[in-house]
Amino acid sequence: MTTAEPAPGPAEPCRGFWADTARIRSGYLAEVPTQTLVLKVAEEVGEAAQAYIGMTGGNPRKGVHKDRTDVLDELADVMLAAAVPMVDLAGGAAQAEAHLAGRLGIVSAREVAAPPAATPEANGWHGSFIAPHVLLRRGDGRVLMLRRDGTGYRDGWLCPPAGRIEPGEHVLAAAIREAAEETGVRLRERDARFVHVMHRTEATLPGPCHALSDYWFGFDRWEGEPYAAEPDKASEALWIDPVNPPDDLIPYCTVALAAITRGEPFSVHGWA
């Protein structure tokens, strides 16, 4: 015979938050190493991000499938997951509470910097971010694409190797680095061909302009066999016909490939 677990009671205020956290640590998490508990925080952060994407419909394959309560639950789990190893590392519940109070005092005392537009010399200047894109082109004219997976943006869709510029990089250096990281190939600047730049906008893009300038570089030569070198971000690498791209190519990439095929060096996308 099994005994049914009692139904959960009403929620209580968090006045005993740290005492309850210590009780959890000494209860069902008693045998879990501190290192594992710290790593668990990253997992909970990922689940919170996925819940937010589900609430806002950021994944077009799934649409809106979460609500505000789901996001709040996941954010609460992030806080709880962080509190448990804090008890270990601080030396007890009281010490963890004191450390958090001190940290809160430091963070809350920070001053907010004035936005750039508040200074006269910055009036009217609002930048778009820059994203380098790489087209590896085989002898038969096909170009390499990666199928996004686990990124939270357009997962399941195809796009070329692309990314962001790191501090100290120019756009071509960033393109070569991103291609190496994502496909495992080695590229040289002297082999690069500038083929296109697209200025595009979308509500989800960062910055005050919600815009990106995509720089596209073509390469007919490289070292190594291209593959999906970041399996946590792409599930496969495949070669497509740029003239007749598949339907699951990210739409702005389809527009850019068409412009490149026509020999057009510049395009805009998403603007009214």
Image (tube, helix red, strand yellow):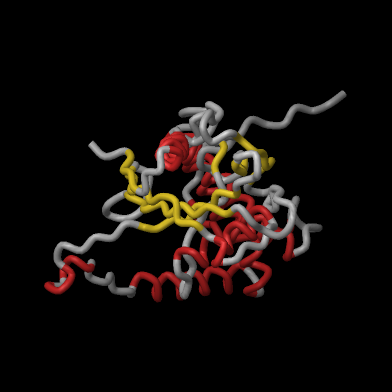
Q: Residue 252 in the image: x percent, y percent?
A: 42, 38
> Residue 56's image quarter?
top left
For the N terminus, the quadrant is top right
Residue at x-position 60% and y-position 52%: 220
For the C terminus, the quadrant is top left
User: Which residue lies most toward the right here?
Assistant: 1
Relative placement, left or right, of 226 versus 206 is right
Residue at x-position 48% and y-position 39%: 53
Q: Residue 192 in the image: x percent, y percent?
A: 53, 60
User: Which residue lies most toward the top here?
Assistant: 1
Name the one closer to the observer, 41 or 3.
41
Looking at the image, residue 159 lies above or below residue 83: above
Residue at x-position 23% and y-position 66%: 115
Looking at the image, residue 48 lies above or below residue 29: above
Q: Residue 63 in the image: x percent, y percent?
A: 48, 28
Name the one closer to the observer, 258 or 44.
258
Work out whether residue 21 can be spotted.
Answer: no
Q: Residue 118 in the image: x percent, y percent?
A: 16, 68
Q: How many marks?
A: 0
Residue at x-position 66% and y-position 62%: 186
Looking at the image, residue 212 lies above or below residue 35: above
Looking at the image, residue 223 lies above or below residue 76: below
Work out whether residue 213 can be spotted.
Answer: yes
